[in-house]
Image (cartoon, rainbow, N blue to C red):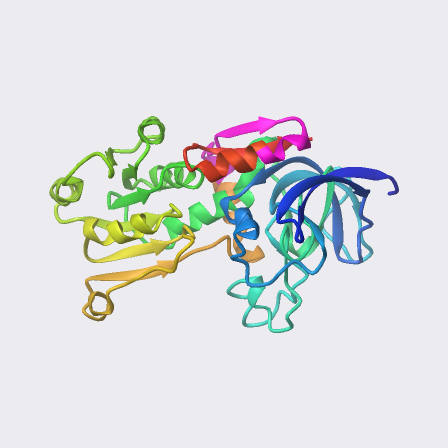
Amino acid sequence: MSGKMRAAQYNTTLNKVEINEIPIPEPGENDILIKNACASLCHSDLMLFWGHTAEKPPMEKVTIGHENAGTVAAIGKNVTGFKVGDPVGCLGCSYACYKCEGCRVHNLHCVEGTGRLHGFTTHGHFAEYSLSDYRNSMVLPAGMDLATTAPLFCAGITAYHSVKKCGLQEGDWIAIIGCGGLGHLAIQYAKALKLRVIGIDISDSQLESAKSLGSDLTFNSASTPGYEKEILSQTGGGVHAAVVLSASNAAYQGAPSVLRVNGILMVIGIPKENLSINALDILLGKYRIMGASSGTPQQMREPIEFSYEHGIKAHMTTFNDIGDIQKIIDLLESGKTAGRFGIVF
Protein backbone atom coordinates (compact mmCIF):
# COMPACT_ATOMS: atom_id res chain seq x y z
CA MET A 1 0.00 0.00 0.00
CA SER A 2 1.52 3.30 -1.07
CA GLY A 3 0.76 6.81 0.08
CA LYS A 4 1.36 9.16 2.99
CA MET A 5 -0.12 9.43 6.48
CA ARG A 6 0.11 11.70 9.51
CA ALA A 7 1.87 10.42 12.60
CA ALA A 8 2.61 11.73 16.10
CA GLN A 9 6.34 11.28 16.54
CA TYR A 10 8.76 11.81 19.41
CA ASN A 11 11.75 13.88 18.30
CA THR A 12 14.74 12.54 20.22
CA THR A 13 16.79 15.69 19.58
CA LEU A 14 14.17 18.18 20.72
CA ASN A 15 12.54 15.95 23.38
CA LYS A 16 9.05 16.76 22.16
CA VAL A 17 6.25 15.32 20.08
CA GLU A 18 5.52 16.61 16.58
CA ILE A 19 3.12 15.77 13.76
CA ASN A 20 4.85 14.55 10.61
CA GLU A 21 3.71 13.26 7.26
CA ILE A 22 5.42 9.93 6.61
CA PRO A 23 4.97 7.01 4.19
CA ILE A 24 2.39 4.33 5.01
CA PRO A 25 4.60 1.41 6.10
CA GLU A 26 4.91 -1.78 4.07
CA PRO A 27 4.39 -4.98 6.07
CA GLY A 28 7.40 -7.25 6.54
CA GLU A 29 7.09 -11.00 6.30
CA ASN A 30 5.67 -11.36 9.85
CA ASP A 31 3.72 -8.10 9.94
CA ILE A 32 0.11 -7.15 9.75
CA LEU A 33 -0.61 -3.60 8.57
CA ILE A 34 -3.33 -2.16 10.78
CA LYS A 35 -5.65 0.64 9.73
CA ASN A 36 -6.03 2.14 13.17
CA ALA A 37 -9.49 2.97 14.49
CA CYS A 38 -8.07 4.31 17.75
CA ALA A 39 -4.72 4.74 19.47
CA SER A 40 -4.64 5.54 23.18
CA LEU A 41 -1.91 7.07 25.31
CA CYS A 42 -0.44 5.17 28.25
CA HIS A 43 1.32 6.79 31.19
CA SER A 44 4.44 4.75 30.37
CA ASP A 45 4.64 6.52 26.99
CA LEU A 46 5.69 9.61 28.93
CA MET A 47 8.91 7.89 30.00
CA LEU A 48 10.35 9.01 26.65
CA PHE A 49 10.12 12.62 27.76
CA TRP A 50 11.54 11.86 31.20
CA GLY A 51 14.56 9.96 29.86
CA HIS A 52 13.54 6.88 31.85
CA THR A 53 13.75 4.34 29.03
CA ALA A 54 16.33 1.55 29.09
CA GLU A 55 17.16 2.23 25.45
CA LYS A 56 17.03 5.36 23.34
CA PRO A 57 14.90 5.10 20.18
CA PRO A 58 17.19 3.91 17.36
CA MET A 59 15.83 6.58 15.02
CA GLU A 60 15.66 10.36 15.37
CA LYS A 61 11.86 10.37 15.17
CA VAL A 62 9.75 7.48 16.43
CA THR A 63 5.96 7.24 16.17
CA ILE A 64 4.66 7.00 19.74
CA GLY A 65 2.05 4.73 21.30
CA HIS A 66 1.64 1.04 22.11
CA GLU A 67 -2.15 0.78 22.61
CA ASN A 68 -4.35 0.45 19.53
CA ALA A 69 -7.19 -1.33 17.81
CA GLY A 70 -8.16 -1.34 14.17
CA THR A 71 -8.64 -3.54 11.13
CA VAL A 72 -6.16 -5.51 9.03
CA ALA A 73 -5.26 -3.64 5.83
CA ALA A 74 -2.52 -5.97 4.51
CA ILE A 75 -0.48 -8.97 5.67
CA GLY A 76 3.09 -10.24 5.24
CA LYS A 77 3.94 -13.52 3.50
CA ASN A 78 4.41 -15.53 6.72
CA VAL A 79 1.22 -14.35 8.40
CA THR A 80 -1.39 -16.96 9.33
CA GLY A 81 -4.68 -16.62 11.18
CA PHE A 82 -5.44 -13.11 9.93
CA LYS A 83 -7.15 -11.73 6.85
CA VAL A 84 -7.80 -8.26 5.48
CA GLY A 85 -10.73 -6.68 7.31
CA ASP A 86 -10.30 -8.55 10.60
CA PRO A 87 -10.70 -6.38 13.75
CA VAL A 88 -7.44 -6.64 15.69
CA GLY A 89 -5.36 -5.41 18.59
CA CYS A 90 -1.79 -6.14 19.65
CA LEU A 91 0.56 -6.11 22.61
CA GLY A 92 3.36 -3.59 22.89
CA CYS A 93 6.38 -5.74 21.97
CA SER A 94 6.97 -7.14 18.47
CA TYR A 95 9.69 -9.08 16.64
CA ALA A 96 10.83 -11.32 19.50
CA CYS A 97 11.45 -15.04 18.93
CA TYR A 98 8.37 -15.90 21.08
CA LYS A 99 9.96 -19.25 22.04
CA CYS A 100 12.82 -18.72 24.50
CA GLU A 101 12.80 -18.74 28.31
CA GLY A 102 12.82 -14.93 28.35
CA CYS A 103 9.83 -14.72 26.02
CA ARG A 104 7.84 -16.94 28.37
CA VAL A 105 8.05 -14.08 30.90
CA HIS A 106 7.97 -11.00 28.64
CA ASN A 107 9.08 -10.54 25.05
CA LEU A 108 11.39 -7.70 26.08
CA HIS A 109 13.50 -10.46 27.70
CA CYS A 110 13.95 -12.34 24.40
CA VAL A 111 17.42 -13.95 24.50
CA GLU A 112 17.88 -13.17 20.81
CA GLY A 113 17.57 -9.48 21.66
CA THR A 114 15.14 -8.84 18.82
CA GLY A 115 12.09 -7.71 20.83
CA ARG A 116 11.10 -4.15 19.98
CA LEU A 117 8.73 -2.01 22.03
CA HIS A 118 6.22 -0.05 19.96
CA GLY A 119 6.60 3.67 20.49
CA PHE A 120 10.10 3.29 21.91
CA THR A 121 12.42 1.05 19.88
CA THR A 122 10.14 0.60 16.89
CA HIS A 123 7.35 2.75 15.49
CA GLY A 124 4.11 2.81 17.46
CA HIS A 125 0.45 3.35 16.69
CA PHE A 126 -0.33 7.09 16.82
CA ALA A 127 -0.72 7.12 13.05
CA GLU A 128 -3.40 6.26 10.55
CA TYR A 129 -1.64 2.95 9.86
CA SER A 130 0.86 0.92 11.87
CA LEU A 131 2.59 -2.45 11.87
CA SER A 132 2.53 -5.28 14.38
CA ASP A 133 4.06 -8.75 14.41
CA TYR A 134 1.16 -11.15 13.81
CA ARG A 135 2.50 -13.40 16.60
CA ASN A 136 1.90 -10.50 18.96
CA SER A 137 -1.64 -9.76 17.75
CA MET A 138 -5.14 -11.22 17.96
CA VAL A 139 -8.45 -11.07 16.14
CA LEU A 140 -11.05 -9.44 18.37
CA PRO A 141 -14.41 -10.96 19.32
CA ALA A 142 -17.08 -9.83 16.87
CA GLY A 143 -18.77 -6.60 17.88
CA MET A 144 -16.13 -5.19 20.25
CA ASP A 145 -16.03 -1.39 20.13
CA LEU A 146 -12.63 -0.51 18.71
CA ALA A 147 -12.25 2.86 20.46
CA THR A 148 -12.76 1.48 23.97
CA THR A 149 -10.83 -1.70 23.14
CA ALA A 150 -7.58 0.09 22.21
CA PRO A 151 -6.46 0.75 25.82
CA LEU A 152 -7.27 -2.81 26.84
CA PHE A 153 -4.13 -3.96 25.03
CA CYS A 154 -1.90 -2.49 27.70
CA ALA A 155 -3.94 -0.88 30.47
CA GLY A 156 -6.70 -3.47 30.44
CA ILE A 157 -4.52 -6.55 30.20
CA THR A 158 -2.15 -5.18 32.83
CA ALA A 159 -5.02 -4.33 35.19
CA TYR A 160 -6.52 -7.80 34.70
CA HIS A 161 -3.20 -9.50 35.43
CA SER A 162 -2.62 -7.25 38.46
CA VAL A 163 -5.84 -8.50 40.06
CA LYS A 164 -5.83 -12.10 38.84
CA LYS A 165 -2.18 -12.75 39.75
CA CYS A 166 -2.91 -11.98 43.41
CA GLY A 167 -4.68 -15.35 43.53
CA LEU A 168 -7.46 -14.14 45.82
CA GLN A 169 -10.66 -15.97 46.68
CA GLU A 170 -14.23 -14.74 46.29
CA GLY A 171 -15.00 -12.27 49.07
CA ASP A 172 -11.37 -11.35 49.78
CA TRP A 173 -10.45 -7.69 50.14
CA ILE A 174 -8.34 -5.90 47.54
CA ALA A 175 -7.22 -2.26 47.62
CA ILE A 176 -6.94 -0.47 44.30
CA ILE A 177 -4.50 2.39 44.93
CA GLY A 178 -4.87 4.89 42.11
CA CYS A 179 -8.35 4.78 40.58
CA GLY A 180 -7.59 6.55 37.29
CA GLY A 181 -6.57 5.18 33.90
CA LEU A 182 -5.51 1.74 35.11
CA GLY A 183 -7.40 1.73 38.38
CA HIS A 184 -10.89 2.16 36.92
CA LEU A 185 -10.27 -0.99 34.89
CA ALA A 186 -8.80 -2.93 37.83
CA ILE A 187 -11.91 -2.13 39.88
CA GLN A 188 -14.13 -3.57 37.15
CA TYR A 189 -12.05 -6.76 36.93
CA ALA A 190 -11.97 -7.17 40.71
CA LYS A 191 -15.75 -6.83 41.00
CA ALA A 192 -16.26 -9.27 38.12
CA LEU A 193 -14.07 -11.73 40.06
CA LYS A 194 -16.32 -11.21 43.12
CA LEU A 195 -13.73 -9.50 45.30
CA ARG A 196 -14.47 -6.79 47.84
CA VAL A 197 -12.84 -3.58 46.65
CA ILE A 198 -11.43 -0.53 48.39
CA GLY A 199 -10.59 2.40 46.14
CA ILE A 200 -7.82 4.70 47.39
CA ASP A 201 -6.89 7.95 45.65
CA ILE A 202 -6.20 11.62 46.32
CA SER A 203 -8.85 12.77 43.84
CA ASP A 204 -12.47 12.92 44.99
CA SER A 205 -13.70 12.78 41.40
CA GLN A 206 -11.81 9.55 40.77
CA LEU A 207 -13.18 8.13 44.00
CA GLU A 208 -16.70 8.99 42.85
CA SER A 209 -15.93 7.06 39.67
CA ALA A 210 -14.66 4.17 41.80
CA LYS A 211 -17.96 4.14 43.71
CA SER A 212 -19.95 4.10 40.49
CA LEU A 213 -17.95 1.06 39.35
CA GLY A 214 -18.83 -0.84 42.51
CA SER A 215 -16.08 -0.14 45.04
CA ASP A 216 -17.30 -1.27 48.45
CA LEU A 217 -15.31 1.43 50.26
CA THR A 218 -13.36 4.49 49.11
CA PHE A 219 -10.81 6.66 50.89
CA ASN A 220 -9.07 9.89 50.01
CA SER A 221 -5.61 9.19 51.42
CA ALA A 222 -4.64 12.87 51.32
CA SER A 223 -7.63 14.29 53.18
CA THR A 224 -8.61 11.43 55.51
CA PRO A 225 -6.27 11.21 58.53
CA GLY A 226 -6.16 7.70 59.94
CA TYR A 227 -7.73 6.07 56.88
CA GLU A 228 -5.29 3.15 57.31
CA LYS A 229 -6.72 2.25 60.73
CA GLU A 230 -10.24 2.49 59.34
CA ILE A 231 -9.34 0.03 56.58
CA LEU A 232 -7.78 -2.39 59.08
CA SER A 233 -10.97 -2.20 61.15
CA GLN A 234 -13.40 -2.56 58.24
CA THR A 235 -11.53 -5.54 56.76
CA GLY A 236 -10.77 -7.43 59.95
CA GLY A 237 -7.03 -6.91 59.83
CA GLY A 238 -6.25 -5.45 56.44
CA VAL A 239 -6.69 -6.16 52.76
CA HIS A 240 -5.42 -9.39 51.24
CA ALA A 241 -3.76 -7.48 48.41
CA ALA A 242 -2.98 -3.87 47.57
CA VAL A 243 -2.52 -3.13 43.88
CA VAL A 244 -0.58 0.10 43.36
CA LEU A 245 -1.50 1.53 39.98
CA SER A 246 -0.46 5.08 40.80
CA ALA A 247 2.92 6.36 39.60
CA SER A 248 3.44 8.03 42.99
CA ASN A 249 6.16 7.05 45.43
CA ALA A 250 3.82 8.15 48.22
CA ALA A 251 1.28 5.54 47.10
CA TYR A 252 3.86 2.80 47.51
CA GLN A 253 4.96 4.12 50.89
CA GLY A 254 1.40 3.98 52.20
CA ALA A 255 0.36 0.64 50.72
CA PRO A 256 1.92 -1.71 53.33
CA SER A 257 -0.02 0.00 56.13
CA VAL A 258 -3.35 -1.30 54.79
CA LEU A 259 -2.21 -4.90 54.19
CA ARG A 260 -2.94 -7.80 56.50
CA VAL A 261 0.00 -9.97 57.56
CA ASN A 262 1.50 -11.77 54.54
CA GLY A 263 -0.65 -9.74 52.18
CA ILE A 264 0.45 -8.95 48.63
CA LEU A 265 1.83 -5.63 47.46
CA MET A 266 1.31 -5.69 43.69
CA VAL A 267 3.68 -3.38 41.81
CA ILE A 268 2.20 -1.82 38.66
CA GLY A 269 2.64 1.97 38.64
CA ILE A 270 6.09 3.25 37.62
CA PRO A 271 7.23 6.23 39.75
CA LYS A 272 9.93 8.62 38.61
CA GLU A 273 12.07 7.66 41.64
CA ASN A 274 13.14 4.17 42.72
CA LEU A 275 11.11 2.45 45.41
CA SER A 276 12.36 2.01 48.97
CA ILE A 277 11.42 -1.10 50.94
CA ASN A 278 12.07 -2.37 54.45
CA ALA A 279 13.98 -5.61 53.88
CA LEU A 280 13.11 -6.86 57.36
CA ASP A 281 9.38 -6.64 56.57
CA ILE A 282 9.89 -8.90 53.57
CA LEU A 283 12.23 -11.26 55.43
CA LEU A 284 9.71 -11.75 58.24
CA GLY A 285 6.73 -12.15 55.91
CA LYS A 286 4.93 -8.99 56.94
CA TYR A 287 3.95 -8.70 53.29
CA ARG A 288 4.97 -10.05 49.90
CA ILE A 289 5.89 -8.13 46.77
CA MET A 290 4.76 -9.15 43.30
CA GLY A 291 4.54 -7.47 39.92
CA ALA A 292 2.44 -7.83 36.80
CA SER A 293 2.49 -6.42 33.30
CA SER A 294 0.76 -6.85 29.96
CA GLY A 295 2.60 -10.18 29.76
CA THR A 296 3.01 -12.37 26.71
CA PRO A 297 0.91 -13.09 23.60
CA GLN A 298 -0.09 -16.41 25.16
CA GLN A 299 -1.66 -14.45 28.04
CA MET A 300 -3.40 -11.89 25.84
CA ARG A 301 -6.63 -13.59 24.80
CA GLU A 302 -7.97 -14.39 28.28
CA PRO A 303 -8.28 -10.79 29.55
CA ILE A 304 -9.64 -9.50 26.23
CA GLU A 305 -12.33 -12.17 26.10
CA PHE A 306 -13.06 -11.71 29.83
CA SER A 307 -13.55 -7.99 29.17
CA TYR A 308 -15.94 -8.71 26.31
CA GLU A 309 -17.93 -11.30 28.27
CA HIS A 310 -18.30 -9.05 31.35
CA GLY A 311 -18.89 -5.78 29.49
CA ILE A 312 -15.72 -4.21 30.89
CA LYS A 313 -14.71 -1.09 28.98
CA ALA A 314 -12.25 1.73 29.36
CA HIS A 315 -13.77 5.11 30.11
CA MET A 316 -12.47 7.01 27.09
CA THR A 317 -12.03 10.66 26.22
CA THR A 318 -11.27 10.80 22.51
CA PHE A 319 -10.06 13.42 20.07
CA ASN A 320 -10.58 13.30 16.32
CA ASP A 321 -7.41 15.09 15.20
CA ILE A 322 -3.94 13.67 15.71
CA GLY A 323 -2.79 17.25 16.10
CA ASP A 324 -4.40 17.16 19.56
CA ILE A 325 -1.77 14.73 20.86
CA GLN A 326 -0.03 17.42 22.94
CA LYS A 327 -3.33 18.18 24.70
CA ILE A 328 -3.56 14.50 25.65
CA ILE A 329 0.02 14.44 26.90
CA ASP A 330 -0.60 17.55 29.01
CA LEU A 331 -3.78 16.04 30.48
CA LEU A 332 -2.03 12.80 31.36
CA GLU A 333 0.95 14.58 32.91
CA SER A 334 -1.39 16.61 35.12
CA GLY A 335 -2.20 13.48 37.11
CA LYS A 336 -5.75 14.73 37.64
CA THR A 337 -7.52 12.76 34.97
CA ALA A 338 -9.77 9.72 35.02
CA GLY A 339 -10.03 7.06 32.36
CA ARG A 340 -8.01 6.88 29.16
CA PHE A 341 -7.32 9.31 26.31
CA GLY A 342 -7.06 8.51 22.64
CA ILE A 343 -7.18 9.63 19.04
CA VAL A 344 -9.92 8.24 16.82
CA PHE A 345 -8.89 8.02 13.17
Q: Which residue is at a point 66% across and 56% down the rendered structure image?
A: 135
The x, y position of residue 168, in whole percent, is 29, 51
Against 2, residue 319 (above or below) is above
* Front one among 8 and 67: 8
* Nearer to me, 233 or 196: 233
Q: Is residue 88 visible?
A: no
The outermost residue toward the front is 14
Instruction: Give the camera-side residue of 199 and 313.
Output: 199
Q: Residue at the spot x=28%, y=49% of the render?
A: 169
User: Which residue corresponds to the image point at 25% horizontal and 33% vertical from the top-left?
Assistant: 216
Quarter of the rendering occupied by the N terminus? top right
> In this rendering, does residue 36 appear at all?
yes
Residue 65 lies, in percent from the top left, at 62, 45
Where in the figure is residue 310, as x and y percent of width and height? 45, 34
Residue 312 lies in the magenta stretch: yes
Above or below for 24 versus 78 = above
The residue at the far right in this view is 2
Magenta highlight range: 307-326
The reply, left or right, for residue 95 in relation to residue 262 is: right
Image quarter where the C terminus lies is top right
Dividing the picture into quadrants, the one containing residue 274 is bottom left
Label tally: 0
**In the drawing, does residue 89 fall left or right of residue 29?**
left
Q: Residue at x 34, y 37 (%)?
A: 191
Identify which residue, 255 or 325, lies in the foreground: 325
- Quarter assignment of residue 18: top right
- 30 falls in the magenta region: no
Q: Residue 131: percent from the left, percent from the top? A: 73, 49
